[in-house]
Amino acid sequence: MHPERQLCIIHSQLYINMKPLQELVRPNIWALKPYSCARDEFKGMKADVFLDANENPYPNGVNRYPDPLQEQLKQLISPMKGVPVGNIFLGNGSDEAIDLPFRIFCRPGKDNVVAIDPTYGMYEVCADVNDVEYRKVPLTADFDMDPDALLAACDDNTKIIFICSPNNPTGNAFQREKIEQVIKTFQGIVIVDEAYSDFSTQRPFRMDIAQYPNLIVLATFSKAWAAAGIRLGMAFASEDIIGLYNKVKYPYNVNVLTQAKAMEILGNATLLQRHISMILEERDALLKAMAFLPICKKVFATDANFFLARVTDANGIYKYLVQRGIIVRNRSRVNLCGDCLRITIGTKDENTKLLAALRQYV
Ligand SMILES: *Cc1c(COP(=O)(O)O)cnc(C)c1O
């Protein structure tokens, strides 16, 4: 028996509902023999003469190919996130961690995925690029998710359910029990996007991947970690699923500069904590001040580093702010978000400028 298959059976005793992995994966991917790069072959042996990859031998910091599996970087991320190295995939932003499951699991023109709506736009874009049907299940009017409705939207060809929590653009995190119900009941893959979990008091799902063989949890360096510019996203899942990610990804998907900068950033966890607490403090203050503005009809509760506000005239206020050099996100054309602006928590100075401008709006 194939070793991957055996692992899958051991896991599925936990939650028997999941189909065997081989049934979920596209046959061409299951059979795929991945590209074997020069640095894969000698792995484990000591060497100091590298004449295997046709690199320029003169050092400048980037003349060598990066580690294809980013071992050193994963060693630092693992204790920080509480996830074993073997359960981590690193990619070129969450974008890569979102796109690869489509290419691993979804047969173009046949399979479909299900997602809450409204949510992060990238899931639908990746579905469209991969020619995979994207089924939207509306949130309730107060942006809550209905697990039964999500499950009812699935059929035999549904490979993935996307749940973003805290959700973008609504800002709220969903009740743990509701997400658990979907993971435990659905026979395919559930992707929980936790890009904003550092700003939430809810326990993250990445801690539970050992329990749920069909769960993929996403995280990113782009938000709390203050590193949107290096393009580094994470996926946490069973070793079987991480193995599939590694098989399909570009061999050197995370470049040398990104790996080095990420290791530097991970060395300063106190700065991260300071940023998070400043952002949370500012979030409280900004939400309270917004609620008093005459232009503001409703401020929605948030578990993220942004919030949604329903205003008297989203289009007019958006344009007015642009003229003042202040850019927010106009979400008024998004489902359930009529006349809503999505506003990121900035520095104290930036938030003060925003409030001053909004007070002067007539
Ligand atoms: C910002 C964001 C991300 C991060 O994407 P990157 O490609 O890692 O920058 C992921 N998911 C959601 C829901 C987001 O809002």
Image (cartoon, rainbow, N blue to C red):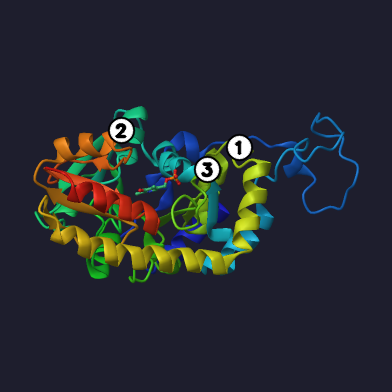
Quadrant where the N terminus sits is bottom right
Q: Position of residue 137 (x, y in %)?
A: 16, 47
Quadrant where the C terminus sits is top left
| Separation of residues labelled 3 and 1 (CA atoms) | 29 Å
Few, some or many residues within 10 Å of mark 1 (<14, 14–19, 20+): some
Residue type at numbered disc 1: Pro
Few, some or many residues within 10 Å of mark 3 (<14, 14–19, 20+): few
In the visual, does 119 lie left or right of 345? left
Q: Position of residue 116 (x, y in %)?
A: 22, 49
Residue type at numbered disc 3: Gly
Which quadrant of the structure image shows residue 314?
top left
Which quadrant of the structure image shows residue 293?
bottom left
Q: Are marks 3 and 2 in contact (CB under 8 Å)?
A: no
- Helix, strand or loop at label 3? It is helix
**Residue carrying label 1:** 34
Q: Position of residue 72 (x, y in %)?
A: 69, 57
In the visual, does 252 lie left or right of 328? right
Residue 190 visible to the viewer: no
Residue 159 visible to the viewer: yes
